[in-house]
Image: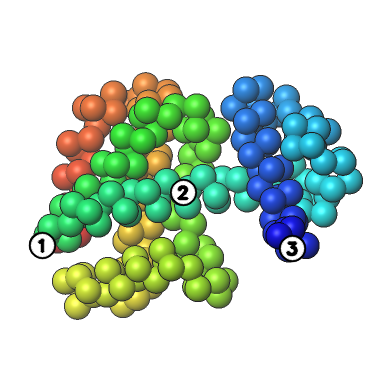
Amino acid sequence: MSESMEQKKETKKKNLLHAAQTLFLEKGVSKTSISEIAERAQVAKGTFYLYFADKDDLLQQLLYQISYDIIRQAYIYAEQRRTDDFAENIIIFADWIIDYLTEHTDILRLIERNFSWPMIQRSLTGHTDDPLWRAIVMRLHDTPLADIHNSQELYDVIFIIVEMCGTVCYSSIIEGRPDTIDNMKPLLYRMIRRLLR
């Protein structure tokens, strides 16, 4: 059975994103042209503009996709190891993210300090049909924090934790400041526990 028109469009967009990620990791964002991305994705340059306004638009969508994939994998990992202690579950979640970014410094260099909690941004614009987002929301509302925080505050707390992890990872792993990630982790985890208790 042949691909539908929508499937073909989605495949082209995925190919463009994949080509861009490969080239950005090889050459850097600034040294990669739209023509090179289109060529690597095996589409005409004009096709690029059917999916993205410009290279910055593509980069933002790519960063969203990368952040989403990392958070999805961290959530699955944490769910498989879930305890009765919500703070410890968040530490497990954060630890997976930090380990991933430590092992994938090329990805960390690409996303720089732009690693974030993308589902919150999407949820605020009405895109709440994502199954991962629904699962996370259910988990958040089933915690002791839900007794003292409204929904927005709950999301904000988790947003702060994810942003803090991303920033600490970039500073420690890429820039080597203020200390190594191994030395920063215990302090970071103490701060997360305090925030959640």
Question: Residue at the spot x=39%, y=34% of the render?
Answer: 101
Residue 76: x and y, percent? Answer: 31, 53
Q: Amino acid at mark 3?
A: Ser
Circle 3 crowding by C-alpha within 10 Å: few under 14, some 14–19, many from 20: few
User: What is the x, y in percent for residue 91?
Assistant: 21, 48
Cα gap from disc 2 to disc 1, whole angstroms? 25 Å
Task: Give above or below for 27 relative to 130.
Answer: above
Among the 4 quarters of the image, the one containing residue 23? top right
Q: Residues within 10 Å of mark 1 (few under 14, many from 20)?
A: few
**For the residue labelled by badge 1, is the local secondary structure a helix, a strand or a loop?**
loop
Q: Quadrant of the N terminus?
A: bottom right
Mark 1 or mark 3, which has the lower sequence index?
3
Residue displayed at 27% across by 75% down? 141
Determine if residue 72 is in view.
Answer: yes
Report if the CB atoms under discs 2 and 1 are less than 8 Å apart.
no
Say which of 90 and 148 sits in front. 90
Using a 10 Å C-alpha cutoff, classify the residue at mark 2 as few (fewer than 14 neighbours), some (14 to 19) or many (20 or more).
few
Kindly give the residue lying farthest to the front in the view shown.
1
Q: Quarter of the image holding residue 166? A: top left
Q: Describe residue 172's horizontal placement relative to residue 1 as left or right.
A: left
Whichever of callouts 2 and 1 sits on the residue coming sooner in the sequence is: 2
Mark 3 or 2: the one toward you: 3
Q: Which residue was labeled with disc 3?
A: 4
Residue found farthest to the left: 84
Q: Which residue is mark 1?
A: 84
Q: Is residue 91 left or right of residue 84?
A: right
Name the front one of labels 1 and 3. Answer: 3
User: In the rendered view, does 51 fall on the left or right side of 188?
Assistant: right
**In the shown orientation, is residue 89 left or right of residue 170?**
left
Q: Which mark is residue 69?
A: 2
